[in-house]
Amino acid sequence: MSKYTWLLDPGHGGMINGKYQTAGKRSPNWKDGYQQLFEGEFNRAIVARLKEMCNQSNIKYVDMCPTDADIRLKTRVDAANALHNKGEKCIYLSIHSNAGGGKGFEVFTSRGKTGSDKIATIFLNSFKSTFAHDENIRFRTDFSDGDPDKEANFYVLKQTRMWAILTENLFMDNQYECKRYLLTKEGRDLIAQAHFKAMIEIETGV
């Protein structure tokens, strides 16, 4: 029996009739003609894998954006808070890929000490163990408040009323990370497995 209801939020929009639904939020056009990454499509691919794993393990979840349209953040958050108000014990998990010239994984929570900090640490540790085989992968942390997650006023973290984290899964403008992991089935499988391993740890121990 699932202890929590996981509110799975694939950030941004997907592809509708071959057209990406969100401005920006994509990898560069690689000079060698390699496939371009559209972040919203990647986010949905990870959530699709998580849903399949949840179904196999009887973990309760809700897909907060079960469409390729770019649903407004307020709409997603209002739906999450409505579930919370009905007494559901929820955890909000927003999935993204990063950009801006960096490398590695990040996990964000809202500002200040909250219960989200503990689950963010579990996710970071899961990313580290899953990708320990690759010395090129970094784990971007901020221990200034005593824990490794980063803090931000992202709408889905600040306005949700339950534990909420946002994962930034590698950098779509980092050629190595994009081509090795973000655009490959094997890479996406690993990223999804890292998330699910953390979810199971939280289900059984938090």
Image (spheres, rainbow, N blue to C red):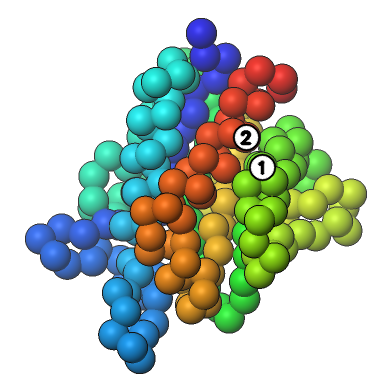
Residue 38 in view (yes/no)? yes
Which of pointers 1 and 2 lies earlier in the amino acid sequence? Answer: 1
Element marked by disc 2: helix
Residue 150 on image: x %, y %: 72, 56
Residue 38 on image: x %, y %: 33, 67
Q: State the residue position of label 1.
A: 126
- Three-letter amino acid code at disc 1? Ser
In the figure, 26 relative to 164: above or below? below
Q: Are marks 1 and 2 in contact (CB under 8 Å)?
A: yes
Residue 159 on image: x %, y %: 56, 43
Element marked by disc 1: helix
The C terminus, quarter of image: top right
Q: Is residue 148 left or right of residue 27?
A: right
Residue 76 in view (yes/no)? no
Q: Is residue 160 left or right of residue 12?
A: right
Residue count near mark 2 (Cα–Cα under 10 Å), binned few <14, some 14–19, many ≥20? some
Residue sticking out furthest to the front:
133
**Which residue sits at x=49%, y=28%?**
6
- Three-letter amino acid code at disc 2? Ala
